Every structure is written in C-alpha cells, then in structure tokens.
C-alpha cells in the first residue's frame, strides 16, 4: 500500500533508517539466529498446547492470566529450577520477569540504566542487536578484546582504571560469557571470578547475556556470573529462542527488585504473549532436559560440515577457532577481503552472510571477518553455499587463489 500523503516532514529526528521490504531468505542463508527446523519439538509442543489450553485456556480472558506482570507462574517456577540446576543461580519467581525475547530484555535494561552520553563496556566482537541499540541511544561503547577464553581481564582492568582517571563510571559491563556471540568461546570460572572482582572494585554492574548457554557441546558450563556475585550487582538475561524456537519470542530477566521494579514500569505492552508462556511451561517441565542434548548433537554435526566445507573450499584462507557450542562460526579471511562488500556480492549469488563490522566495536579489526550461522541450512545447503561463497570471494578479492575441485551437487 502506498500513500500520496507525505509523512516524511512529520518524522522526528533520530529515527532509525527505514527498513527495506522483505524479499525472503536467500537460497543459502547463513544469517541470523535461526535454528534447525527439524529439531523444533513439534509433536510435543502440539501436545503441550492441547493440555494447557484445555486445563487453563479460559484464563486467557485476563491480562497476564491473573499471574501478575512478571509472567506466567509455572514458567517462572520452571526457570527457578532450571537456573539452579544448570547455572547455579539461586533465585525465586519474584526475581524473574518474562519478556518478549531477549531483545526486549536488552531494551528494558538499557532504558532503565542508560541515557545519551553514557559509557558501557563491551566485548570487542559482540551481538549486533546490542550494538545497534546503543548506537541509537547515543551511548559510548568501549570494546575489550577477546581471546579463546572470552573477554581479556588484563585489558578490562586497565580500561576501568583509565575511565576512572577521567571521571567516567561505566553504566555496565556487557558480556556473553557462555558460548559467546559471535566467537563461540566460554569464559572459564576463574576469569568470571576476576570479572566479578573488577566490577565490584570499580562499582560497575555486570550485564550477563546467557542466551546461548544451553547449547554447549560438552553439556557442562561454568556457573553463571550472576551466581558468583556476592553483591548482587549482576543482571542476567536468557531466552528460549536458541533452545526451543526463536519465533516463540520468550525470554527472561533475573534482576534485584530495585531494578526489576523500574523495568516493570517501562514494560508497557500489558504482558508478553501468554499462550507462548503457557505452552513452554507445559512442554519444558517434562521434555527440556532431554530435548537440548539431542538438539546440540545435531548442531554439532552441522558445525563439522561447515568447517569441512570451509577447509575444502577456502583452504588456509579461512581461519577460525572451533566454537564450544552454539550456532555460529566466526571466520577470518585474508586482510584484503572486505566482508561488507563480500556480503553484497554473495547475496546477489544467493548466499547471505553476516559481515564482521556489524558484530564488532572495531571496524578495522573485523573488516575481513564474517559470522556464519550453521543451524538453519541443511548439510547439503551448507556445502553448496560455502562453494558459492568461495567462488564469489575469489572473483571479488582473489581469495581463495584456487577453488577446490569439487563436484557441485544438484
């Protein structure tokens, strides 16, 4: 639908750029946080839907199902048990807020704590959705380099000292410590303890994004930073997007009441979708603990296929550290490759990738890097898509110098 009325003069300053029209997914899609469609537990979700609707469906007539603004009580009860078992977090249902995916969690935390001109500390390579929000808010982001164990504490310590010397107290330290996005690293317990110590010393809260923490290959993860903080200076967020299904849009926040009460006053949507919460609670209690290991096993095989395809098609031109879980591979190509330009050329050939500069606080560091999501495409699509990507990259940048002699699959 088009309009002859000119709305443009009425738009306030500072609006984000307009969104392009949706034209569908690329033939070979390695973007976003989409998961494996075959691993959505469809039959069990259908069963859970029938059970919970027959039992409690009439409560949909009341906002929040008469369970209050923090979300459906059985789902919060499940999370209390899960967080204790998996992450070592001791919390009650009153410490939990159900939100519309982790993106709403980001917005609520940011709108509670930040104003234009504030400073926050981030991992140098980080989640695009978090970085974009801060750019729109006019917040100064200081990036800390990562190594194989996550955020480097030596650089964090010197950065905090430097900011303090200039009279700047960061509003928070944002970290994805368990299956970091995009690098796939896991911060060990000793480094988490050092992060807690530094944050306490400088009076800075920690914002812990644990949205990928269920997808660890080994099945074991360190305690959440929230569980290790004696002062309670940690806001913890998580999601069912990666463990069950992203389109459900159900996430959660664990926070002290003095922060939670402020976030509740900003959550003006009259509650996140109740049906999704009801179905998740009915599904998760009997099935979550067995579903996640099966999902991670499948994802691990897709990662192996992706790494094999990259080695086959790019050879030594593609460098990467094997992630310890999750759905992403962070790839470094030779310096002459501009992944923002590669993204455009690859898309024209039917391959979508996430260019590195969109996932980093340092455009120079990330200019030849890209993030590939391996969860959504099939094994055959992974192999074919990487072959097309290598062909495009060679035409555009001469990398790799020679394409692998591989028979293309129909």
Image (cartoon, helix red, strand yellow):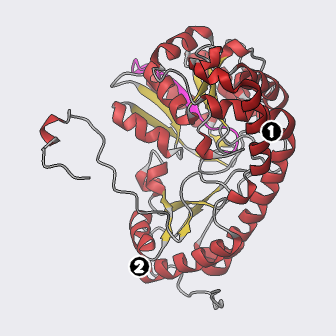
What residue is drawn where x is 67% and y is 38%? 177
Residue 295: x and y in percent read 78, 52
Looking at the rendered structure, the number of numbered marks drawn on it comes to 2
Instruction: Kindly indicate the quadrant of the structure image that contains residue 71.
Output: top right
Instruction: Kindly indicate the quadrant of the structure image that contains residue 139.
Output: top left
Magenta portion: prevailing SS class = loop
As for residue 354 lying within the magenta part, the answer is no
What residue is drawn where x is 42% and y is 27%? 119
> Quick one: label 2 or label 1, which is nearer the N terminus?
1
Residue 346: x and y in percent read 45, 72
Judged left or right of residue 275, residue 223 is: right
Residue with the mark numbered 2: 396
Residue 97 in view, yes or no:
no
Residue 301 in view, yes or no:
yes
Q: Is residue 321 above or below residue 122?
A: below
Q: Say whether marks 2 and 1 touch (CB < 8 Å).
A: no
Q: Is residue 180 above or below residue 74?
A: below
What residue is drawn where x is 64% and y is 35%? 276
Find the magenta span and give its range: 165-179
Q: Is residue 111 above or below residue 386?
A: above
> Few, some or many C-alpha atoms within 10 Å of disc 2 (few <14, some 14-19, many ≥20)?
some
Residue with the mark numbered 1: 221
Residue 156: x and y in percent read 56, 32
């Amino acid at each position: 639908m088009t309009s002859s009325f000119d709305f443009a003069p009425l738009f306030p300053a500072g609006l984000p750029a307009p969104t392009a029209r949706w034209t569908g997914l690329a033939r070979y899609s390695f973007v976003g946080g989409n998961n494996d469609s075959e691993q959505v537990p469809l039959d069990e979700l259908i069963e859970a839907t029938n059970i919970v609707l027959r039992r409690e469906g009439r409560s949909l007539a009341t906002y929040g199902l008469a369970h209050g603004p923090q979300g459906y009580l059985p789902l919060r009860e499940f999370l209390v048990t899960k967080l204790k078992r998996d992450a070592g977090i001791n919390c009650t249902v009153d410490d939990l807020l159900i939100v519309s995916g982790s993106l709403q969690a980001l917005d609520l935390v940011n709108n509670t704590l930040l104003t234009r001109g504030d400073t926050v500390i981030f991992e140098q390579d980080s989640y695009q959705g978090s970085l974009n929000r801060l750019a729109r808010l006019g917040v100064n982001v200081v990036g800390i380099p990562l190594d194989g164990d996550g955020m480097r504490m030596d650089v964090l310590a010197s950065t905090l000292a430097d900011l303090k010397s200039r009279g700047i107290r960061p509003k928070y330290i944002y970290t994805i410590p368990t299956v970091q996005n995009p690098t796939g690293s896991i911060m060990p317990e000793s480094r988490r303890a050092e992060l807690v110590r530094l944050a306490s010393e400088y009076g800075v809260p920690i914002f812990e994004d644990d949205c990928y923490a269920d997808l660890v290959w080994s099945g074991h993860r360190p305690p959440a930073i929230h569980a290790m903080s004696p002062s309670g200076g940690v806001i913890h967020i998580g999601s069912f997007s990666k463990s069950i299904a992203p389109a459900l849009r159900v996430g959660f926040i664990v926070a002290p009441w003095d922060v939670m009460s402020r976030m509740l006053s900003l959550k003006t949507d009259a509650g996140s979708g109740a049906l999704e919460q009801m179905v998740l609670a009915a599904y998760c209690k009997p099935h979550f603990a067995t579903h996640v290991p099966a999902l991670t096993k499948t994802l691990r095989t897709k990662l192996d296929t992706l790494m094999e395809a990259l080695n086959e098609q790019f050879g030594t031109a593609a460098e990467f550290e094997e992630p310890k879980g999750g759905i992403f591979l962070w790839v470094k190509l030779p310096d002459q490759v501009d992944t923002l330009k590669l993204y455009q050329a690859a898309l024209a050939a039917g391959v979508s990738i996430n260019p590195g500069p969109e996932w980093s606080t340092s455009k120079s560091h990330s200019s030849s890097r890209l993030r590939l999501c391996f969860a959504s495409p099939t094994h055959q699509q992974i192999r074919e898509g990487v072959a097309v990507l290598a062909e495009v990259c060679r035409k555009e940048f001469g990398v790799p110098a020679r394409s692998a002699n591989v028979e293309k699959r129909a």
